[in-house]
C-alpha cells in the first residue's frame, strides 16, 4: 500500500488491520509522519507536533498488540488533539499568546482517555485563538489553510482538526463546539464532525469558551470512525459538573448497519433561508438519498431560530472567563478576539438572564417538535469556505445555522454531501434527541453507505 | 458613530475594570448601537410564563 494511502486508513479499518497483523502501528504512524512533514508547512494544522512521542506511542501499541493487550479501537491509531485540551507534558496554548508557555500539570480527561486507550497522539492542533472564531486564521500561530483550496480557511474554531483529518495528517482529531466549532470545519473541510450531547464527553481540563455551551467531540473521515472515537472518550467524569451519568452502557456504534426505513426525518426549512444554491442543491439531493433508504421526510418549522441565533450567552460567558486577562493583559489578544470579548462584557445582566430563559423555551420547543420526528436535517453552513484574504466581521455568519444546537445540547453530526462549483466541500447536519448518538450515527452511517462524498480526498501535492 | 454609544461601551467596560483603547471602542460601538435587548419569554409566548428555575423534588 502506498504511503499516502496508508495515511488515509480510517480508525475502523486501522483497528481491524492492526489486530489482523496486516499493518503495524509504527507503519501507520510513520506514513502519517511522512505526509505531515511534507504537507504541514503548507497546511499549518499543528501548533505543536509531537512526532517523537508519537513514535514511542506507536511502539508501545505494537508491543501491546503482540502481548494481546487491547485497550480500545484507537490503540495504535494516529490521533491529534485540539490545542485547547490540557496535556501534562506538552504546552497547551489554546491558540493564544496568553497561554503560549503553559505546560499543564495534569492531562484533560479526554487526553487521559486517549492515552489510556492506546491512541498515538500526533500533537496539538491549531485553532482560532481561545476557540473564539470560525476561521482559524490565528494571529499568533499562523493561518490554517483549507486542504481543498489553500487560499481559503478551513472553518473554525477547530480548523486545525478539520484540516488535519481531511489531509491525512491524523486519522481523527478532537474538536470542541460552542457555536459550531466541530461542525463548521467538518463541513468546510469535507470530513465528519460529531458534536455529542452536552455532558457526554468531559470538559475537565479543556480551556473553556462558554461553559454552558461547550462540547467536546471527534472529527473523522467517516461516521463509523466518529462513533468508535466517541466511545473511547465518552463517559461520566465527576471533574465536570455537567457530565452525564447514564445507567446503560454507552455505545455510539450500537446501531450501525441497522436499516433506517420508516424513520421520520424533519427537514428544518428555516435553515435553508439564505443558503447558496450549491449548498441547497446538495442537501436536497441528500434528502432524496434518505427517502431512497426508506426514511419518511417532512418539513418542520422552528420560528424561534432567529431569536436564538442572536442570544448573547456565549459572548457573556466568554467575557466572564476572560475578564481578568482583559483587565491585565488586553494587548496579548488579537484585536478581533479582544473586541468579541469586550462585546460580551457590555451585555446587561437582564439580557443574559432573559437569554437563558429564551434558550430554555427553545429547547422545550425543539423537544416538542421531536415528538413527531426522529431526527432533524439541515445544511451545516450556508456556504462553502471563503477566501482567507476576504475574512471580515461577516465571517461569523458561518455559525448562523450551527449555533442554535449548542443551546439545546442535543447531538448533531455533520457529514459531507457534495461539492460546489469550485470543488469545495458541502456538509449536511443531522440532529437527534439528547443522548441518542447511536441513532444519529446509524442514520448518518446509512447515508455514507449510499454515497461516496466522504471518501473524496483533496488533491494536495 | 454617536459618541454616546462609545461612552456607553466604555462605561460598561470600566465598571468591570477593563480599559478599552480608542480602537476597541471604534470596533465595539457599532455592535452596542445595533444591539437590541433580549425579549423576555413572557413577551413572546404568554404573559403568565414563569421564569424557569431550580425545582427541588423530595424523594
Image (cartoon, rainbow, N blue to C red):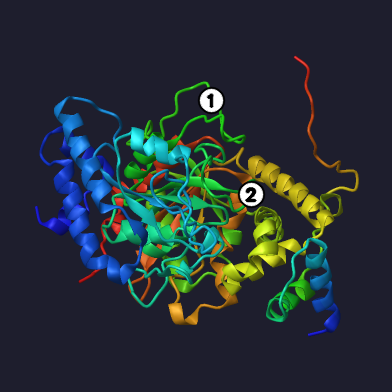
Which residue is at the far bottom?
A: B1
Q: Nearer the viewer, residue A388 or A303?
A: A388
Residue A92, x across and y down, in percent: 45, 53
Residue A193, x across and y down, in percent: 42, 51
Q: Nearer the viewer, residue A220 or A436?
A: A220
On the image, numbered disc 2 is attached to which residue? A407
Residue A357, x across and y down, in percent: 77, 47
Which residue is at the far top?
A: B59
Does residue A168 sit above or below A425 in this rendering? above
* Residue A327 position by quadrant: bottom right
User: Is A121 situated left or right of B32 in this image?
Assistant: left
Does residue A4 sit above or below A28 in this rendering? below
On the image, numbered disc 1 is attached to which residue? A246
Q: Chain of mark 1?
A: A
Q: Nearer the viewer, residue A405 or A129?
A: A129
Distance between the Cα atoms at labels 1 and 2? Answer: 21 Å
Quarter that holds the C terminus of chain A: bottom left
Q: Mark 2: which secondary structure?
A: helix
Does residue A400 sit above or below A255 in this rendering? below
Is residue A190 visible in the rendered image? The answer is: no
Q: Residues within 10 Å of mark 2 (few under 14, many from 20)?
A: many
User: Is A305 situated left or right of B6 in this image?
Assistant: left
Q: Chain of mark 2?
A: A
Q: Residue at x 23, y 69 (%)?
A: A459
Amino acid at each position: 500500500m502506498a504511503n499516502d494511502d496508508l495515511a488515509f486508513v480510517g480508525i475502523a479499518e486501522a483497528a481491524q488491520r492492526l489486530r489482523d497483523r496486516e499493518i503495524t502501528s509504527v507503519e501507520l504512524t510513520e506514513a502519517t509522519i511522512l505526509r505531515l512533514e511534507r504537507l504541514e508547512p503548507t497546511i499549518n494544522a499543528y501548533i505543536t507536533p509531537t512526532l517523537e512521542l508519537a513514535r514511542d506511542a506507536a511502539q508501545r501499541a505494537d508491543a501491546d498488540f503482540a502481548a494481546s493487550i487491547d485497550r480500545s479501537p484507537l490503540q495504535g491509531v494516529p490521533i491529534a488533539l485540539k490545542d485547547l485540551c490540557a496535556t501534562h507534558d506538552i504546552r497547551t496554548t489554546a491558540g493564544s499568546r496568553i497561554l503560549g508557555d503553559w505546560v499543564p500539570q495534569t492531562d484533560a480527561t479526554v487526553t487521559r482517555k486517549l492515552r489510556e486507550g492506546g491512541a498515538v497522539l500526533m500533537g496539538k492542533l491549531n485553532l482560532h485563538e481561545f476557540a473564539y472564531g470560525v476561521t482559524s486564521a490565528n494571529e499568533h500561530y499562523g493561518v490554517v489553510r483549507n486542504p481543498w483550496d489553500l487560499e481559503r480557511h478551513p472553518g473554525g474554531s477547530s480548523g486545525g482538526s478539520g484540516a488535519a483529518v481531511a489531509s491525512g495528517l491524523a486519522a481523527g482529531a478532537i474538536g470542541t463546539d460552542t457555536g459550531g466549532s466541530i461542525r463548521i470545519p467538518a463541513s468546510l473541510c469535507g470530513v465528519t464532525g460529531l458534536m455529542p450531547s452536552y455532558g457526554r464527553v468531559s470538559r475537565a481540563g479543556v480551556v473553556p469558551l462558554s461553559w454552558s455551551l461547550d462540547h467536546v467531540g471527534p472529527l473523522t473521515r467517516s461516521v463509523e470512525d466518529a462513533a468508535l472515537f466517541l466511545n473511547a472518550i465518552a463517559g461520566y467524569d465527576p471533574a465536570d459538573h455537567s457530565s452525564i451519568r447514564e445507567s446503560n452502557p454507552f455505545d455510539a456504534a450500537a446501531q450501525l448497519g441497522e436499516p433506517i426505513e420508516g424513520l421520520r426525518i424533519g427537514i428544518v426549512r428555516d435553515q435553508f433561508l439564505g443558503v447558496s444554491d450549491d449548498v441547497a442543491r446538495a442537501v436536497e439531493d441528500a434528502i432524496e438519498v434518505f427517502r431512497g433508504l426508506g426514511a419518511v421526510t417532512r418539513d418542520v418549522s422552528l420560528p424561534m431560530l432567529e431569536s436564538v441565533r442572536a442570544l448573547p450567552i456565549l459572548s457573556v460567558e466568554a467575557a466572564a472567563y476572560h475578564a481578568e486577562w482583559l483587565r491585565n493583559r488586553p494587548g496579548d489578544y488579537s484585536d478581533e478576539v479582544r473586541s468579541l470579548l469586550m462585546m460580551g462584557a457590555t451585555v446587561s445582566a437582564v439580557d443574559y438572564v432573559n437569554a437563558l430563559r429564551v434558550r430554555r423555551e427553545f429547547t422545550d420547543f425543539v423537544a416538542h417538535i421531536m415528538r413527531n420526528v426522529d431526527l432533524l436535517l439541515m445544511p451545516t453552513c450556508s456556504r462553502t469556505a471563503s477566501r482567507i484574504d476576504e475574512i471580515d466581521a461577516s465571517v461569523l455568519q458561518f455559525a448562523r445555522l450551527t449555533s442554535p444546537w449548542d443551546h439545546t445540547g442535543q447531538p448533531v453530526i455533520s457529514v459531507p454531501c457534495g461539492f460546489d462549483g469550485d470543488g469545495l466541500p458541502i456538509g449536511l447536519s443531522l440532529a437527534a434527541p439528547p443522548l441518542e448518538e447511536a441513532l444519529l450515527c446509524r442514520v448518518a452511517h446509512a447515508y455514507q453507505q449510499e454515497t461516496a462524498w466522504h471518501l473524496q480526498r483533496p488533491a494536495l501535492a | 458613530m454617536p459618541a454616546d454609544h462609545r461612552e456607553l461601551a466604555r462605561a460598561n467596560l470600566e465598571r468591570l475594570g477593563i480599559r478599552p483603547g480608542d480602537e476597541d471602542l471604534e470596533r465595539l460601538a457599532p455592535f452596542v448601537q445595533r444591539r437590541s435587548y433580549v425579549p423576555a419569554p413572557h413577551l413572546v409566548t404568554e404573559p403568565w410564563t414563569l421564569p424557569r428555575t431550580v425545582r427541588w423534588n423530595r424523594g
